[in-house]
Image (tube, rainbow, N blue to C red):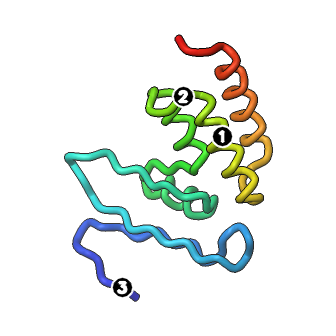
Amino acid sequence: MFATSPGWRACCSRTGCDGTRNAFGLVAPSQKYVLVLLTNERPLRKLATVLGVTAHGSLWVIRTLVDRGFIDPPAGLMAMSALCEANPRLPEAECTRLRRDLELRSSRGPG
């Protein structure tokens, strides 16, 4: 049990993808900021979506960093490759799709 301020919502996922993990998020109401929950736990992302909170995983973070020019495609490709190797629970199809996109963008060069 835990107490929260009025308007705050808790997102809990008792069983993670590996069957043993617990995932928890606390969502604060905000009229000034857009809230986004970052987690690789699919059950938690689904619950957050039901609660009306935008939720994304780490592959989305890498794609967004590249798309917005914070890192270049080769750096995104290195980060994505390391992440997919380190976390076998990430969706293989999504890793492959992102890898192909970043390889293509890297081969085009700057500009």
Which callout, 3 or 2, points to the residue nearer the camera?
2
At which x and y percent is residue 12? 51, 72
Task: Kindly identify the residue that appears in the image at 69 percent across and 34 percent down.
Answer: 98
Q: State the mark number for residue 78.
A: 1
Reading the chain from its start, which is encountered first: label 1 or label 3? 3
Where on the picture, by quarter, is residue 110? top right
- Whether 41 is drawn above or below 66: the answer is below
Mark 2 to mark 1 CA distance (whole Å)? 10 Å
Name which residue type carries label 2.
Asp
**Label 2: element kind:** loop
Name which residue type carries label 1.
Met
Where on the picture, by quarter, is residue 40? bottom right
> Is disc 1 in contact with disc 3, using a CB cutoff of under 8 Å?
no
Task: Kindly identify the residue that appears in the image at 67 percent across and 51 percent down.
Answer: 83
At which x and y percent is residue 58? 57, 50
Reading the chain from its start, which is encountered first: label 2 or label 1? 2
At which x and y percent is residue 63? 57, 35
